[in-house]
């Protein structure tokens, strides 16, 4: 019997030595059987590890719940308006307001160089005006050929932006945190894609396909892409035309006043007259703050303060 027990004693000694610093020896249960000179040992180590695993899973769930709650507290809005109305200037004003406001600019550079946007490879490339993958320029030069392609890519880039979690500083603040987007997946559809369809740049089949996948994605992602409010920077098309000419973006050289007028009409129908048919319940009665974008607020500190105050009051009501 002692000859059979010797191997077991040596093995038990090693196991006990390894575990004595982390678990009580009473947790270790061994069943010994002797058959043809062989020894079998059954140790219930799962009982040792189970409490640790439970604590780890509980901690992870608690951390996840905290993060989700923090994300839900962040208010999300979009800044809407015509081409060259001053959205980027207004966005910089809000970003520099010294509050818990984060403004995500429109991903124009991605549209100017599709290949680089997709590959994400940092390497020397031609200027956006010369590259063959400048989809923004291609759309303006040949709307019937490229409008659907452009609206698909622009909407996907906006979707990715809206699906990104808020910056850590917004999640950690105890004050009201706000994530703002320069335009949104909704204006992509109800302003620009719809306008191109009405102008003939997108045919009826393309429009049906666009609406189908757009509705599907919005429904699938649900609250992750919903907005709590919209800021509409409103200005006459003529004012936008003058600003567009001053900024001199290469791709926009061929834009005419009548095109800006059609876009202005789309904005008015959607955000002022409420005559645009929208397909998402949360969007039908969304609060809209209308600001006078015709004012030259870029260098007017008094007007900037007025805008900041109006935005602050609007956020408090959401």
Image: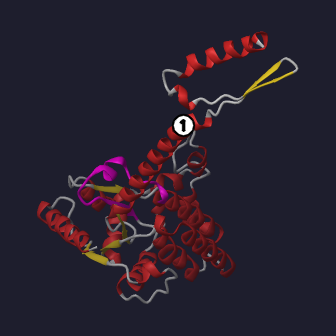
Identity of the residue drawn at 54% across and 74% down: 193
Which residue sits furthest left?
A: 302
Decide which of 3, 121 is in the foreground and name it. 3
Task: Specify few, some or many for label 1: CA neighbours under 10 Å numbering under 14, 14-19, or 20 or more.
Answer: few
- Is residue 73 positioned above or below 11 on the image? below
- Is residue 194 positioned above or below 175 on the image? below
- Is residue 36 positioned above or below 6 on the image? below
Snapshot quadrant of residue 180: bottom left
Decide which of 253, 174 is in the foreground and name it. 174
Identity of the residue drawn at 58% across and 72% down: 214
Report x, y in % for residue 257: 41, 76
**Is 81 a magenta residue?**
no
Q: Total number of numbered labels?
A: 1
**Is 180 a magenta residue?**
yes
Which residue sits furthest front?
A: 1
Report x, y in % for residue 72: 38, 62
Q: Is residue 266 visible?
A: no
Report x, y in % for residue 239: 30, 73
- Dividing the image into 4 quarters, which one contains the N terminus? top right
- Does dot 1 land on a helix, a strand or a loop? loop
Write down the region rendered in magenta.
163-182
């Amino acid at each position: 019997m002692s000859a059979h027990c010797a191997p077991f004693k040596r093995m038990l000694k090693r196991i006990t030595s390894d575990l004595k610093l982390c678990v009580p020896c009473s947790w270790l249960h061994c069943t010994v059987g002797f058959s043809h000179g062989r020894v079998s040992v059954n140790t219930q180590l799962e009982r040792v590890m189970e409490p640790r695993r439970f604590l780890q899973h509980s901690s992870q769930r608690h951390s996840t719940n905290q993060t989700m709650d923090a994300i839900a507290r962040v208010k999300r809005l979009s800044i809407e308006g015509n081409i060259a109305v001053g959205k980027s200037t207004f966005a910089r004003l809000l970003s520099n307001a010294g509050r818990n406001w984060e403004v995500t600019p429109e991903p124009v550079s991605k549209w100017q160089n599709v290949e680089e946007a997709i590959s994400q490879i940092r390497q020397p490339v031609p200027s956006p005006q010369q590259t063959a993958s400048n989809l923004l320029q291609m759309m303006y030069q040949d709307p019937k050929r490229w409008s659907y392609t452009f609206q698909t890519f622009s909407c996907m880039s906006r979707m990715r932006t809206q699906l990104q979690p808020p910056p850590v500083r917004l999640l950690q603040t105890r004050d009201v945190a706000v994530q703002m987007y320069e335009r949104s997946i909704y204006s992509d559809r109800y302003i620009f894609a719809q306008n191109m369809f009405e102008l003939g740049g997108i045919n009826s089949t393309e429009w049906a396909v666009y609406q189908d996948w757009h509705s599907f994605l919005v429904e699938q992602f649900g609250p992750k892409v919903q907005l709590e409010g919209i800021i509409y920077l409103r200005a006459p098309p003529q004012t936008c035309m003058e600003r567009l000419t001053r900024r001199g973006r290469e791709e926009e050289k061929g834009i005419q006043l009548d095109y800006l007028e059609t876009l202005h009409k789309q904005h008015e129908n959607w955000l002022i007259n409420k005559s645009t048919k929208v397909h998402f319940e949360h969007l039908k009665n969304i609060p809209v703050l209308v600001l006078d974008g015709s004012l030259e607020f870029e260098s007017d500190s008094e007007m900037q303060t007025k805008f900041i105050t109006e935005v602050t009051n609007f956020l408090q009501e959401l």
